Amino acid sequence: MRVDPYYVTNLVGSLDQAQASEQQLSSELSSGARVTSLSQDPVGSGENVLLLNQIQQDDSFTQSSSLVTGQLQVADSALGSVVSQLTQAISLATSANNGTMNSSDVKSISNQISGILDEVQSLANTSYQGQYIFAGGQTSTAPFATSTATSPAVTTYSGDEDVNNLQTPNGQKIQLNVPGDQIFMGSGSNSVFGALNSLIADYSSGTVDTNQAVSDTEALGTALNYVSQQRVTIDNSITQVTAASDAVTSVQTQLTTAQTNLMQADVATVSTQLSLSETQQTALEDVIAQLNSTSNDLFSKLPE
Amino acid sequence: MGTINSALSIMSQALDADQEALNVVANNVANANTPGYTEETPNWQENQPISIGGVSYGQGAAETGATSARDRVLESRLDQQQQLASASGSRLTALDTLQALFTPDSGSSSSTAGDIGSDITSFFDSFSSLEATPTSNSLRQGVLTAAKALAGDISNAAASLNSQRSALDQEATGVTSQVNSLSSAIAQLNQQIQTTSPDADAGTLEDQRQEDLSQLSQLIGINQITTQNNGLEITTTSGQLLVSEGMNYQLTTGMVNGVTDFFVGNTDITSQLTSGGGSLGGYLTARDQDIPGALTSLDQLAYSISTTVNAQNNAGTDYDGATGTAANPLNIFSEPTAVAGSAASMSVVMTDPNQIAAAGAGDGTGDNSNAAAMAKLASQSIVNGQTPTNYYSNFVTTLGSTVSSVQTENTAQNASVTQLQTQNNALSGVNLNDEASSMTTFERSYEAASQVFTMLNTIMASALNLGDQTTVS
């Protein structure tokens, strides 16, 4: 049987392949990336896009959640101050209602409650980063204003009923604000401003219509409870954001691990493959050197 | 009756024949590394015997040229396989350049630059962030920055694809002149072979023609048809005549719809050449199928994102309380008119971050419902029935699979070429050991003939002297 006299050329081809494989493996080792082109692992590359998408989304949510937590905490603290102001107003009204005060004392109570109204209104107009947080969607203008043209005075709400939600990566919606009129202008006896304005009017003359004043004081008590209830919504949101952020962070950790496993080179495996390639290269080189040595040629055996 | 003279004549012919045989061996050794050379073996022939008085006397041997060790079927198989391997090889080179534009992102922050997948995510994430504080100027600016990165990377990729396409176009055009010079060389060789050797293997001329054929096979897909008097007809794989015996038909090029098309006479054979094989077939497949395919996918992605995001932004209220109208649209991206070309022309037209409509229609500027709707687009099937990220993920998987399958194909075809090459070399290659052995044989034969000649000379002297040893020596 005849053989291919140029078989050494084919061996050199194999040698090239061994070297190309070594080059690829060393680049995997130095970059740490297992997949450096799509064709090396098409399915893995596609999966990688999806994993990175989720990781980035989670990362972005974690940042958003720290932003909204700040805003929610400001709202919570404002409502906390409102509650303590209202508590003080109720105790002032109760002392005025017991009939032991003289006219000027009652007027002074009226002035103090009026001060509380200003304070509560300023709290209701609280802004965070330049935006009024109890104005619904109309965050660029202060939502509450009081007109003293009538007696009792009237506080109006210029915001709207808009509620913002933050959506978590798994689709859960977290309420970010409570419109101001829901908190401070609740219907009937739930209205904080209505009750405060009525009390101011009740005591402004120095004489107290006890029945009316007691009824208005009770209304303020109801309104206070109502504010506390609304505050719970904000507190719940804070808890939800924290919980969602924690959950997302833990998911993100898992995803990052999965992504690392998918795309990063396994140093042990790559090193083993590299070592095998090197061995093969050495072997091939030896074979080629052996075959190319002139003593293997019949011509060299011919008599000189 | 045999004579000493005729014996001397037989021996001198034998010496000539051995010299000629040694000449063939020397030629083989000299051409051991010539591409396309096939090993030749000397032909030996017994001379016609002479019959004298009913008795037949042998008249020695003659050397009548050499025969090339050739298997036409094997050579034509090798050519065909070479055409396939060249096609997948040049296509693979083009695809390797193509897929380098979409190198997988390893996940580290430095690798995300230029990655369209990350850009898509960052863009829609910027709306999620805006959802938290819809009035924040820096977050609004962030949306525009992410939009610019996305539009920039998509349009850069499209521009690179287009320039790769024109580079392939040029390479393909460059092949034409090589094909033409080879086909005219083959036509000339056909003429020579038909004149000098109509009935038998034409040896060296045949080697040259075969070498030209195998070079031509690396360039384009061809069929070979043997005609009378050892002539050859060459057509493209789909039957367009390129060489007919002594005539060759030039391949010409011309621009059609912005790309180079290939003609023979007035016939446009571009699509035939594309599927035909050879490196030209590979270039054309990449130029007319692979790159346009990738471009179409990017176009679809760019078109869907641009139009959907623009429409959603126009559906909301911006920071200045304005809503987009037909006359004054609040477009973030330049609005594409058709899918084709969307990727290359994708750009951000919005300059004022206040124009991002985070609030819902009719809502106050503090509302975030439209920003939420924009962020939600990321998980909606807005690109050909898929989410943008899924669409891109499928795109890279498809592209990677194509490259990987062409790689596999090319490896298999190259292995097959190597195998056929080995078979062909085993038959036609010059084996120096064989030559050494032949040379020794002919050398011995020559020595023997000259020895016999010397002996005959002595015998002749004896005959002339008739016993007297001193007259002739």
Image (cartoon, grey):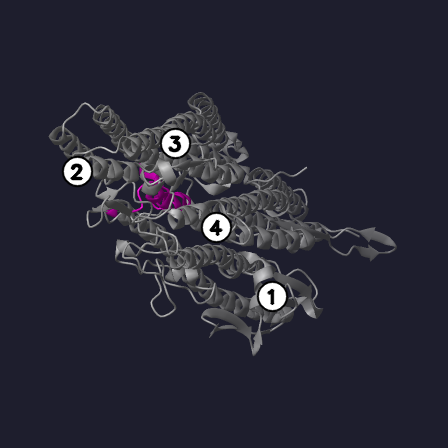
Please say whether residue B396 is one of the residues in the magenta stretch. Answer: no
**Residue at mark 3 to residue at mark 4: CA–CA distance:** 57 Å
Outermost right residue: B54
Could you say where residue B39 lies in the image, as x and y percent from the top left?
A: 60, 49
Q: Magenta region: which residues?
A: B110-137
For disc 1, the marked residue is B272
**Residue at mark 1 to residue at mark 3: CA–CA distance:** 71 Å
Along the polypeptide, which appears first: circle 1 or circle 4?
Answer: 4
Q: Residues within 10 Å of mark 4 (few under 14, many from 20)?
A: many
Quarter location, residue B191: bottom right
Q: Amino acid at mark 4?
A: Leu
Vertical position of residue B11 compared to residue A113: above or below: below
Kindly identify the residue that appears in the image at 58 percent across and 55 percent down: B83
Magenta stretch, main secondary structure, is: helix
Badge 2 marks a residue whose secondary structure is: loop
* Residue B157 visible in the shown view: yes
Give me the disc on residue B95.
Answer: 4
For disc 2, the marked residue is A205
Give me the disc on residue A233.
Answer: 3
Badge 1 marks a residue whose secondary structure is: helix
Kindly identify the residue that appears in the image at 57 percent across and 50 percent down: B85
